[in-house]
Amino acid sequence: MIFDYPAWTAGAIGGGLIGLASAVYLLALGRIAGISGIAGALFDVRRPEISVELSFLAGLILIPVIAVSAGFQTDIQITENPVLLVVAGLLVGLGTRLGSGCTSGHGVCGLTRFSKRSFVSVVVFMAVAALVASLIRPLLGV
Amino acid sequence: MKGNISFLAGAIFGLGLLLSDMIDPARVLAFLDVGSGIWDPTLAFVMGGAMIPMFLAWSLRRMLSKPLLANVFPDGATGLLTPRLTGGAVLFGLGWGLVGLCPGPAFAALLLGGWPVWLFVASMLAGMLIHRVALSPETARKPA
């Protein structure tokens, strides 16, 4: 294990901001801050007030790049294997909509309301993701 | 007003992903890869940190008859464990473990991570569209 206390502290504070944003979204707007649900709403043409979801996504996409241009340091390391990116993207998009949520919706919002569905979902996707990252990725050599 | 609050919530969410470094797929994979010997538990601290305000929010929700700017709170979870739920979680876990991106960080990294993030997000949206046209409960209920 890496005992990287500054990273752990930044993680907990950053996590606190994620939780705060989700709390505002629930208490002010009556919505669940699940990013897969918010993105999936883009394909629901009959949905009222789609501007709310679009505004959330605009903030989510724009603020990190603004913070970085203001001097915040970050390093994004991602595979450049196009097949892997397409397959993983399709699986994440399809899987989160089929399973009604992702790390934010089931993880942050669902677990804290003691939802049995969210608990099962989080255990399953965490276990599968850990298995893939620990065993399948080394086998694929990526 | 709703749009501004929603933008603010998205902005705080994105700032949280940046500060916690969950915007970096390598950091996420370092948590998911438990076999490398250099396991990085940061993601657990992020989840813990995020759950505290959200737990308080659910407590506050019980004291409010309706949201501050809307008419109704979301429905309670139904509690039904369905093949859809677990099957979806399996597919999501497969994709997340392969690249280290889930939907939130994918959007937050869109303008910072170059073409690979664009390709991932486009594929993710395509996956959501496939679900919408072929697999959503609304589609299933349509007469053939």
Image (tube, coloured by chain):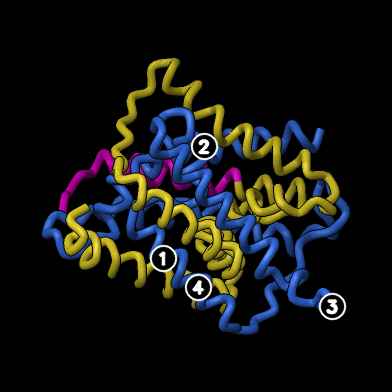
Secondary structure under the numbered disc 1 in the rendered image: helix
Please name whichever residue, A71 or A51, is drawn nearer the observer in this view of the structure: A51
Numbered circle sitting on residue B143:
3
- Residue placed at 35% from the left, 45% from the top? A82
Secondary structure under the numbered disc 4 in the rendered image: helix
Horizontal side of residue A138 vs A105, given as left or right: left
Chain letter behind tag 2: B
Discs 3, 4: same chain: no
Discs 1, 2: same chain: yes
Query: Where is residue B59, by image quadrant?
Result: bottom right
Horizontal side of residue A131 vs A123, given as left or right: left
In space, the residues marked 1 and 4 are separated at their CA atoms by 10 Å
From the viewer's perspective, is the residue at label 3 or at label 4 nearer? 3
Chain letter behind tag 4: A
Residues drawn in magenta: A1-21
Shade of chain A as shown in the rendered figure:
yellow
In space, the residues marked 3 and 4 are separated at their CA atoms by 30 Å
Residue located beneath label 4 in the image: A121
Chain letter behind tag 3: B
- Residue placed at 34% from the left, 60% from the top? B97
> Magenta region, mostly helix, strand or loop?
helix
Discs 1, 4: same chain: no
Q: Earlier in the sequence, mark 1 or mark 2?
A: 2
Residue located beneath label 1 in the image: B93
Numbered circle sitting on residue B141:
none
